[in-house]
Structures are given as C-alpha cells and as structure tokens.
C-alpha cells in the first residue's frame, strides 16, 4: 500500500463494497523475510508496502531499520485507514478510522509507559536474561 502523504486512497483497493482481507505477516524483519521466502501461499498474495517516510510511534523507544518502516500494529492501522478511505460504505469508513485510532492510542499509551519506566531510576536497572543456564546482561 503506497499512500501519498495523508491521501489514504489507493487504486489497488476496490470500493465495490466487497469485504477486504488483509494478511499481515508479523515478526521481526528477519522472521517475516524467512516466512515470506518459505511460503508459496504468502508469495502468491499481492504485496504492498509503505514507501513514505512516516515517523513511527515507536521512535522514542526503538529504532526501525529504515525511516519508512513501522511496527506491525502501525501497518495494520495504516491499512485500515486506506481500506476505509477506499470504501463507499460510510459504516466501513467510520469503523476503519475508529479501529485505526484505537490501535494508535493503545500503542501511544504503551510507549508512554515504557518511557516512564525507563526514566524511573529504581526500575531502569539493566535487565538480566537467562541463556543456557547462565545469567547475562
């Protein structure tokens, strides 16, 4: 899906009122690449990507591999907005915008919570994780 700035219309989406199915492959970039390469079914589906530079809601707490990359949740949100804008059905438009807004609001709250936690000196001590029975930092 390649929206131009805030224009969420797309010639690849039908406004015929037919249901739209969107398949989102979720995982790390390496995991999703591997899933796509090993699944002929996924490879047979049309693929769309966002090619505009959009600030990710995750930017304050993690860096994406490229400026046009976003989290899966943000991609779903953007796809909902695109589908809604392409729909001639007012209820579908409203539901798409509402759903996208709810996802973005939830992600914003999560990021704000992470930032608050990271700035709390008592809680922000380095975490340890267990690997093979040995604790590492």
Image (cartoon, helix red, strand yellow):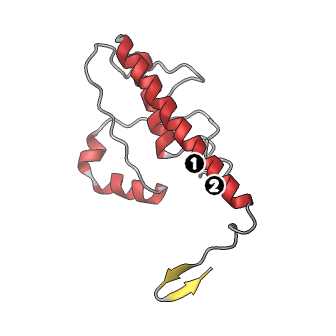
- Seen as rendered, the residue at the extreme bottom is 134
Q: Quadrant of residue 119?
A: bottom right
Query: Which labelled disc corresponds to residue 114?
Result: 2
**Structural crowding at the residue carrying mark 1, measured as other residues with C-alpha within 10 Å and reported as few (<14), some (14–19) or many (≥20):** some
How far apart marks 2 and 1 lie (CA) works out to: 6 Å
Q: Please, what secondary structure does the residue beneath circle 2 have?
A: helix
87 w.r.t. 120: above or below: above
Residue at left 63%, top 51%? 113
76 w.r.t. 118: above or below: above
Q: Nearer the viewer, residue 95 or 44?
A: 95
Residue at left 47%, top 42%? 73
Point out the image quarter for the N terminus.
top left
Using residue 117 as the reference point, say whether residue 3 is left or right of it.
left
Residue at left 47%, top 30%? 100
26 w.r.t. 136: above or below: above
Q: Which residue is mark 1?
A: 110
Q: Give how far across and how far down residue 26 sits, in percent.
A: 40, 50
Q: Nearer the viewer, residue 61 or 15?
A: 61
Using residue 9 as the reference point, say whether residue 112 is left or right of it.
right
Residue 62 shows up from this direction:
no
């Amino acid at each position: 899906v390649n929206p131009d700035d805030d224009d969420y219309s797309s010639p690849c989406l039908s406004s015929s009122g037919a249901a739209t199915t969107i398949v989102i492959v979720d995982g790390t970039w390496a995991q999703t690449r591997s899933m796509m390469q090993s699944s002929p079914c996924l490879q047979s589906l049309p693929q769309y990507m966002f090619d505009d530079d959009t600030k990710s809601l995750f930017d304050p707490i993690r860096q994406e591999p490229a400026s046009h990359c976003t989290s899966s949740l943000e991609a779903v949100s953007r796809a909902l907005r695109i589908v809604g804008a392409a729909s001639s059905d007012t209820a579908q438009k409203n539901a798409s915008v509402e759903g996208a807004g709810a996802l973005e609001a939830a992600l914003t709250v999560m990021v704000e919570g992470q930032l608050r936690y990271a700035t709390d000196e008592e809680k922000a001590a380095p975490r340890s994780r267990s690997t093979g029975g040995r604790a590492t930092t």
